Image: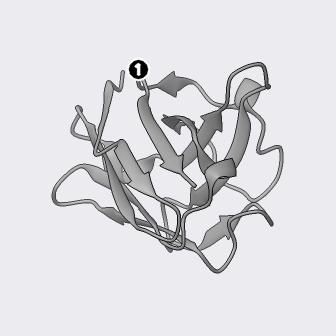
Amino acid sequence: QLQLVESGGGLVQAGGSLRLSCAASGRTFSSYPMAWFRQAPGKEREFVAYISSKDRNTYYADSVKGRFTIARGNAQNTVYLQMNSLKPEDSAVYYCAARRWDGFIRLHENEFNYWGQGTQVTVSS
């Protein structure tokens, strides 16, 4: 069982930066691949970034590639999302998620087993 708690959201101007954190409970955090998703009002939840459990390889949605960086600190049981050059269209509730198997495929919310409660990110123009 894994419990996830996000933090770090807030209001920022376009072009600014935020760093989200997701703290996980459980002694086996390092064995879980982790991801960030986001959901804007009236839209479906969409994939943002992924980091593998074994070699920390990363994968990003095209919309955030080059601006966002996902990282994990296994000693801290935490996954991070550094968001730079933020745009108003990045405004959403951001969720961290975990699943039991590794791989850069099927990066859809239905493939993830554990979720945090979300943190709001608002980017003003």
**Residue at image coords 49%, 66%:** 54
Say whether residue 49 is left or right of residue 21. right
Q: Amino acid at mark 1?
A: Gln
Question: x, y percentage for residue 43?
Answer: 79, 25
Residue 64 falls in which quadrant of the image?
Answer: bottom right
Whether residue 107 can be seen here = yes
Residues packed near mark 1 inside 10 Å, few (<14), some (14 to 19) or many (20 plus): some
Closest to the observer: 41 or 124? Answer: 124
**Residue at image coords 63%, 44%:** 101
Query: Which residue is labeled 1 in the image?
Result: 117
Question: x, y percentage for residue 117?
Answer: 41, 20
Residue 58 falls in which quadrant of the image?
Answer: bottom right
**Residue at image coords 48%, 41%:** 122
Closest to the observer: 80 or 27? Answer: 80
Spot the residue most to the left: 76
The image quadrant where one finds the N terminus is: top left
